Image: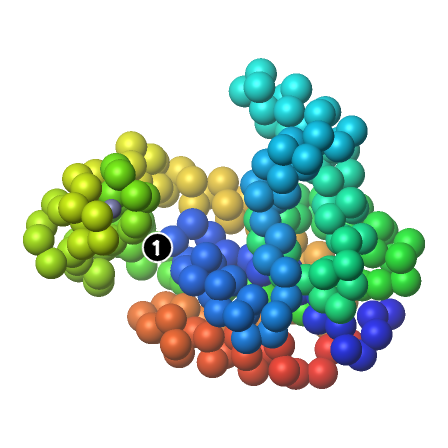
């Protein structure tokens, strides 16, 4: 399907799984463009393409952008020059329907996914990570009260701003967010497993370096 040089990668991970950190490292090591649905939609809106204008209508109305529009934006993005030799998709696909349509649009271009990486972290650990998270009001930098505390409690090391806890990081809300994620994602895992492209990196109790070693082992393994 894909040419041997291509790495066409999807990264799956729950909130708190360290997906953002691993995505940054993958992009740095393999030189892949980091394509996140949120970034794509913002870029399409800013660029004023037809799809971007359509996406904007939903976003301005505070509604979820429909699959049709998201797929259109992904399709446009994947045909850009920097994505020809590979890409890292982050935050997409989220549903089976999106996954099926992604397979189809890659197939039309004679391409296919080469790796789907699942970051697996036990739910209790995700809850502990998210519930201890604090963010800077001024610059957005993220801390953790246990794992990554600022040098002065409640104050951002980078800019001196005030740290706060996001409303949706309290434990009940976190468990709900994780339940939603699992309901959507477990079927995706079962969609990709039979294709022989699914690799799982275990993030439970592990440092980002240890997780990244597993990610590299997956990405360096020969695909399909
Ligand atoms: Zn700050």
Is residue 169 or residue 31 the one in the foreground? Answer: 31
Q: Position of residue 92 (x, y in %)?
A: 63, 48
Q: Is residue 197 left or right of residue 200?
A: right
Q: Position of residue 183 (x, y in %)?
A: 55, 44
Q: Position of residue 46 (x, y in %)?
A: 63, 33
Is residue 113 or residue 83 the one in the foreground? Answer: 83
Q: Is residue 99 left or right of residue 32?
A: right
Whether disc 1's CB lies below 8 Å from ligand 1 is answered no
User: Which picture quadrant has residue 98?
Assistant: top right
Q: Is residue 77 left or right of residue 202?
A: right
Q: Secondary structure at mark 1?
A: helix
Is residue 160 or residue 92 the one in the foreground? Answer: 160
Quarter that holds the N terminus: bottom right
Let me know if residue 170 appears in the view: no
Q: How is the image coloured?
A: rainbow
Q: Is residue 146 left or right of residue 52?
A: left
Q: Report crowding for label 1: few under 14, some 14 to 19, many 20 or more residues within 10 A (C-alpha).
A: many
Q: Position of residue 185 (x, y in %)?
A: 58, 50
Q: How many dots with numbers?
A: 1
User: Which picture quadrant has residue 210?
Assistant: bottom left
Quarter that holds the C terminus: bottom right
Residue 139 against residue 189 in the figure, above or below: above
- Residue linked to disc 1: 126
Outermost residue on the left side: it is: 152
The residue located at (72%, 61%) in the rendering is: 82
Let me know if residue 175 appears in the view: yes
User: Which picture quadrant has residue 136?
Assistant: top left
């Amino acid at each position: 399907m894909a040419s041997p040089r291509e790495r066409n990668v999807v990264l799956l991970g729950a909130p708190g799984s360290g997906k953002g950190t691993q995505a940054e490292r993958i992009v740095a090591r393999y030189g892949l463009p980091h394509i996140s649905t949120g970034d794509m939609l913002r870029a399409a809106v800013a660029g004023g393409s037809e799809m971007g204008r359509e996406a904007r209508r939903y976003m301005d109305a505070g509604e979820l952008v429909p699959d049709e529009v998201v797929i259109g934006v992904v399709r446009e993005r994947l045909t850009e020059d920097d994505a020809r030799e590979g890409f890292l998709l982050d935050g997409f696909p989220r549903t089976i329907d999106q996954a099926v349509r992604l397979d189809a649009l890659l197939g039309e271009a004679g391409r296919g996914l080469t790796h789907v990486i699942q970051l697996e972290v036990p739910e209790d650990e995700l809850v502990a990570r998210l519930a201890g998270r604090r963010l800077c009001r001024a610059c957005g930098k993220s801390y953790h009260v246990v794992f990554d505390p600022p040098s002065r409690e409640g104050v951002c090391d980078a800019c001196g701003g005030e740290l706060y806890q996001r409303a949706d990081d309290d434990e009940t809300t976190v468990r709900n967010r994780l339940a939603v994620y699992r309901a959507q994602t477990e079927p995706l895992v079962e969609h990709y497993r039979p294709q022989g492209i699914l690799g799982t990196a275990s993030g439970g109790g592990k440092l980002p370096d240890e997780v990244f070693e597993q990610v590299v082992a997956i990405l360096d393994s020969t695909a399909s």
